[in-house]
Amino acid sequence: MPGRTTAPYGRSTGRYARAVAAAVVATAALIAAANAVPAHPTDERQTPSAAQGQVRGG
């Protein structure tokens, strides 16, 4: 095929490097977003069992 620049089964390290870089950036963005603001409960009132540290269930 005229105009083909790489072998059909050749290694395209540039493509893999971009994919790895994108994965690293995405992972860093997810970690930063998860740690940006601590989660707070919407209801500030605690139930008596939660205040005493008891676990419900059996």
Image: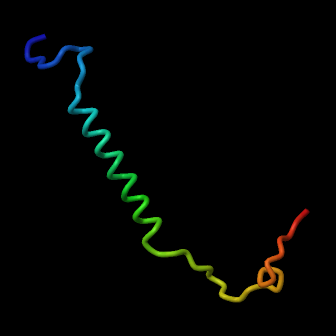
Q: Is residue 14 above or below residue 10?
A: below
Q: Residue at x 32, y 40 (%)?
A: 20
Among the 4 quarters of the image, the one containing residue 51: bottom right
Residue furthest toward the bottom? 45
Residue at point 83%, 81% (across, down): 49
From the viewer's perspective, tell me whether residue 26 is left or right of residue 57.
Answer: left
Q: Is residue 45 left or right of residue 39?
A: right
Q: Can you name the residue that lies furthest to the front here?
A: 53
Q: Is residue 56 left or right of residue 31?
A: right
Quadrant for the N terminus in the image? top left
Q: Report x, y in % for residue 42.
A: 62, 82
Residue shown at 19% from the left, 14% from the top:
7
Which residue, as the protein is rendered here, is positioned at the far top?
1
Q: Position of residue 12 (x, y in %)?
A: 23, 25
Q: Residue at point 43% right, 71% down?
A: 36
Labels in figure, total: 0
- Which quadrant of the structure image shows residue 48? bottom right
Q: Give the farthest residue toward the right.
A: 58
Establish if 29 lies above or below 53: above
Place of residue 58 in the rendered image (x, y in percent of width and height, measured from the top left): 91, 62
Percent of width and height locating residue 13 = 23, 29
Indicate how the structure is coloured in the image. rainbow
